[in-house]
Image (cartoon, grey):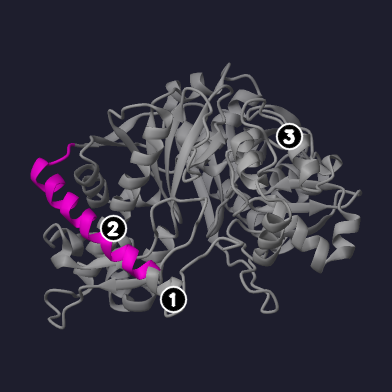
């Protein structure tokens, strides 16, 4: 008899994938494809999500994962989904997609400015209820649609997040969960459902907001059309998933207040579980509903860390890619081997990419590398890659400090997961920078694991999400901080803060271009 398994479908910022897990949380098979979001040259900052093409990509991933697992489709007892947050999909009354965007779509800058001018005080009022600013929320984007695509606005009958879009594609049911829905800026932290007062003040018709169901709720079954696309069995239960960060935290065992993690993917999210939802008076830190009912999370975001390493790989590392392929290893593993031989501090190189979280006035300096030397032995590829790794850890440490202060907790250790945690070096750098022990789980792709746990909860294998996490999370590596290196990185952090502030002033003066600027700034 074939043992039961579940399937998690993940729509990430840089790729889509399908992952199969058994009931013990072991990853059985995975298939993944990178995707690129569309930018419309008529609309600066646009990042559209191609629902048709990306569904085909995800369907291919499901078929490939099934083939790689050697399992029959009937072995998949349930399926759930996770995705990048903030991205939204608009649907017509027939359940067809009208328009969609990815997470960092920033086309609605003018609408954000106009909205703030017409409703002064709205953003701070809404943040106190939802934990979100306007920067990446749905409200400015809906205003943009109303202004630029009035025919889409007129036909919009439902709004969903991207993980909900996957659930709808599979089951035909358009719903929402609190963890991803919270990033729309329309969902209240305390009630974990839509705040119709905020919606009406923003001019958003509450009728377009779908029913809210907690992560782990069985919502429907795989339709005949979805079965034909994916190779899944028609009638397989479909379970509500959630936002990638909150699910990722659950997949790391973070199911209780005071626990913290760094999720090292395309973006690096630094999260701290809060005993109660509390908005930041300075509006620096986001506050999101956790996938675990009753918990919220204070969150910092280090922008585009994975994209920075991908840029470095693609721009400068053709030879390393060739060597890595010849050895049968990932090119990032080879780059870590090289950077491991560089002394901490990377010979003084200061990368300028993501700033510390400040969602009330969110923008970054121009991407830069400071303190370069013309001596290639001092600032070659190993040194620059090491500096990029150290810089990611510095920004993560600063964001964790902000989040822990807001949550009112003292951190005892940090869980590190995501693609960045696969190598041996980055975890040690993170421990040394933060001065805290760091532990890496066996399954570093915790987001997909937790989506799998949601599927198991949805069919009754586990009674709750925390119970499921306690049962399956296992630890692979532990890192202890080094006191001398921690002191050195404290000095590097101080110099980086001053350098970053100077680089932001160049953006303010119009001399350089911001790596990313929130709409309305």
* Residue 156 in the image, given as x and y percentages of width and height: 86, 53
Quadrant occupied by the C terminus: bottom right
Say which element carries label 3.
loop
The mark that comes first in sequence, 3 or 2, is 3
Q: Is residue 449 left or right of residue 81?
A: left
Residue 371 seen in this snapshot: yes
Which residue is pictured at 70% across the width and 41% down the height?
A: 186
Image quadrant in which you'd find residue 413: top left
- Give the magenta part as a residue range: 480-504
Mark number displayed over residue 194 = 3
Quadrant occupied by the N terminus: top right
Label 3 – label 2 distance at C-alpha: 38 Å
- In the rendered view, tell whether residue 249 sits above or below residue 303: above
Image quadrant in which you'd find residue 495: bottom left
* Residue 182 in the image, given as x and y percentages of width and height: 63, 39
Mark number displayed over residue 497 = 2
Mark number displayed over residue 134 = none
In the rendered image, residue 493 lying in the magenta stretch gets the answer yes
Residue lying farthest to the left in this orientation: 484
């Amino acid at each position: 008899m074939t043992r039961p398994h579940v399937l998690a479908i993940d729509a990430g910022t840089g790729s889509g994938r399908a992952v199969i897990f058994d009931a013990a949380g072991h990853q059985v098979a995975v298939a993944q494809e990178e995707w690129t979001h569309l930018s419309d040259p008529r609309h600066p900052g646009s990042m559209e999500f191609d629902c048709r093409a990306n569904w085909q990509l995800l369907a291919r991933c499901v078929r490939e994962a099934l083939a790689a697992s050697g399992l029959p489709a009937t072995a998949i007892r349930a399926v759930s989904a996770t995705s990048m947050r903030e991205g939204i999909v608009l649907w017509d009354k027939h359940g067809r997609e009208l328009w969609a965007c990815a997470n960092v779509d920033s086309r609605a800058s003018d609408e954000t400015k106009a909205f703030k001018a017409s409703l002064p005080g709205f953003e701070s009022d809404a943040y106190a209820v939802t934990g979100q600013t306007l920067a990446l929320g749905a409200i400015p984007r809906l205003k943009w649609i109303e202004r630029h695509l009035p025919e889409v606005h007129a036909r919009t009958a439902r709004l969903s997040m991207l993980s909900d879009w996957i659930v709808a594609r599979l089951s035909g049911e358009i719903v929402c969960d609190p963890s991803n829905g919270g990033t729309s800026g329309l969902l209240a932290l305390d009630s974990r459902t839509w705040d119709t007062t905020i919606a009406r003040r923003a001019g958003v018709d509450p009728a377009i907001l779908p029913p809210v169901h907690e992560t782990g709720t069985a919502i429907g079954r795989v339709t005949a059309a979805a079965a034909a696309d994916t190779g899944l069995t028609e009638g397989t239960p479909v379970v509500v998933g959630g936002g990638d960060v909150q699910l990722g935290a659950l997949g790391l065992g973070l199911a209780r207040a005071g626990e913290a993690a760094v999720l090292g993917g395309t973006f690096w999210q630094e999260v701290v579980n809060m005993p109660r939802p509390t908005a930041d008076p300075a509006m620096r830190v986001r506050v999101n509903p956790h996938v675990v009912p009753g918990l919220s999370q204070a969150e910092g975001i280090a922008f585009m860390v994975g994209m920075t390493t991908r840029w470095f790989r693609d721009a400068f590392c053709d030879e390393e890619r060739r060597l890595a392929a010849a050895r049968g290893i990932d090119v990032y593993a080879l780059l870590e081997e090289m950077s491991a031989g560089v002394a901490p501090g990377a010979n003084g190189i200061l990368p300028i990419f993501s700033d510390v979280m400040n969602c009330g006035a969110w923008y970054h300096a121009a991407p830069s590398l400071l303190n370069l030397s013309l001596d290639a032995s001092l600032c070659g590829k190993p040194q620059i890659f090491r500096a990029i790794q150290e810089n990611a850890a510095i920004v993560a440490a600063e964001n964790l400090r902000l989040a822990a202060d807001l949550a009112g907790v003292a951190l005892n250790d940090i869980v590190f997961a995501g693609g960045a945690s696969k190598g041996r070096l980055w975890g040690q750098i993170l421990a040394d920078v933060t001065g805290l022990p760091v532990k890496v789980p066996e399954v570093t792709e915790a987001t997909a694991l937790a989506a799998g746990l949601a599927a198991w909860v949805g069919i009754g294998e586990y009674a709750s999400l925390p119970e499921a996490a306690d049962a399956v999370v296992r630890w692979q590596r532990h890192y202890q901080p080094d006191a001398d290196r921690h002191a050195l990185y404290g000095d590097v952090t101080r110099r980086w803060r001053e350098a970053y502030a100077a680089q932001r002033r160049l953006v303010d003066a119009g001399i350089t271009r911001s790596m990313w600027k929130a709409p309305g700034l």
